[in-house]
Image (cartoon, grey):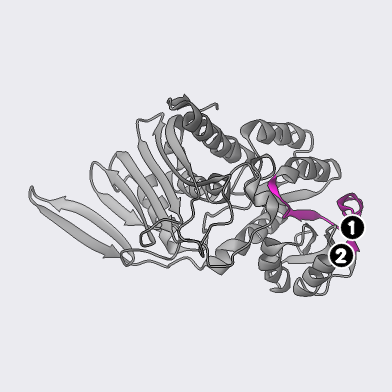
Amino acid sequence: MADQPIRYGIIGAGVIANYMARVFTEGRGSTAVAISDVNAEAAAKLAVAAGGVKKIYADYHQLLADPEVDAVYIATPPFLHKPMTIDALRAGKHVLCEKPFMLNQAEVREVSAVQKTVPQLKVLCASSRYHDAGIALKARAMVAQRELGELYHVSYTQVTGAPKPGTTLPPWRNNPAKNGGGMTYDWGPYDLDWLSWVLGDLFRPRVVFGTLGNYFPLTAERVPPCLDVDGHYCAQIICESGLTILWERRAAEHGPARHTIELRGKKGGLDTYFMPMPEKPGLQHYAYVGTDELKTTVLPDAPPNWDDAIVHPIRELTAAIRENRAPSNTLEDNVRIHGVIDALLTSAKTQQAVKVVT
């Protein structure tokens, strides 16, 4: 298999699958051979975008039974992720599942139990680790090599604008039973996965205290489409080492978009970013020289390309299969990530700090 392309079946032909389609035509070892969607027109459109796929199935079980499919990319609404992932593993297929990986930590554990019966199969969640981008790699290396000293505080804040007038989303996006939540499930897995990768062993969440808030109308013309799910969250995460993480996202508010990630250690500080919309250029390193002079150094960086970041999970799963190694985003990572999300939801309801289940 090392010399052959990994043959993918795509389950779900919505917006994100069409965004991902180009990865199957770039000649880097991943090819699409089958598509499944209950919407025949959508499946046919994706088949063209993914390189002229010939096999289209209305029932995803038919795709899973296809012996020419080595791996599946699941791009369906979140409430379908668990049954489809488990069915794929039982059918002998490697799996890349879109985020949010599951609806809660218990579902991740169910998938993990099944994967342990077929340990040769790889399971990966669409993640945001930016392995090809210098910014995340440099930040990760500086933390691992303790260039900042003992890390004690991380702040992760992002504010985005309101939806454009006329924006519509499918009904399941506004149904917590099908979507899990709003911004917590849309962007939260990306945020937490990035933090998990950059912080390494320091990302061992123990307690979460947080709040959630719903989307709200800005004007009569700019009413966000999701009114029953959260549109902003703010959480304090305390890790086993004592590291404190302030994790916050807000959308559809009266104010400018902004984004900064701050890492502070006893020897220095670092400002960086997750998405290519920084408030400051490059990586900013801070350290006091002597007793009163704060030295600021702009470090060379390679900003992440968002288009490449989106399709990177397919490349990563393909590489993990070919190299017979664990993918960079593991089931253990997702147990931890969904443990934090579960704790945030409970904390927001009870207004109490909640212990993260590990």
**What is the x, y in percent for residue 7?**
80, 61
Helix, strand or loop at label 1? It is loop
Q: Which residues are magenta?
A: 56-78
The image quadrant where one finds the C terminus is top right
Q: Is residue 351 visible?
A: yes
Cβ atoms under marks 2 and 1 closer than 8 Å = yes
Disc number placed over residue 82 in the picture, else none? none
301 lies left or right of 43: left
Q: Which residue is mark 1?
A: 58
- Give the alpha-carbon distance from disc 2 to disc 1, as whole Å: 7 Å
**What is the x, y in percent for residue 313?**
63, 57
Please give the name of the residue rendered at 67% of the width and 62% of the height, measured from the top-left corner. Answer: 16
Q: Label 2: how many residues lie within 10 Å, few (<14), some (14-19) or many (20+)?
A: some
Instruction: Report the number of discs.
Output: 2
Could you tell which of marks 2 and 1 lies nearer the N-terminus?
2
- In the picture shown, does residue 112 fall above or below 170? above
Q: Nearer the viewer, residue 111 or 28?
A: 111
The image quadrant where one finds the N terminus is bottom right
Helix, strand or loop at label 2? It is helix
Residue type at mark 1 is Ala
Residue type at mark 2 is Ala
Q: Is residue 185 magenta?
A: no
- In the picture shown, does residue 89 fall above or below 60? above
211 lies left or right of 279: right
Q: Which residue is mark 2?
A: 40
Q: Quadrant of residue 159?
A: bottom left
**What is the x, y in percent for residue 155?**
35, 46
Q: Nearer the viewer, residue 58 or 301?
A: 58
Q: Is residue 64 magenta?
A: yes
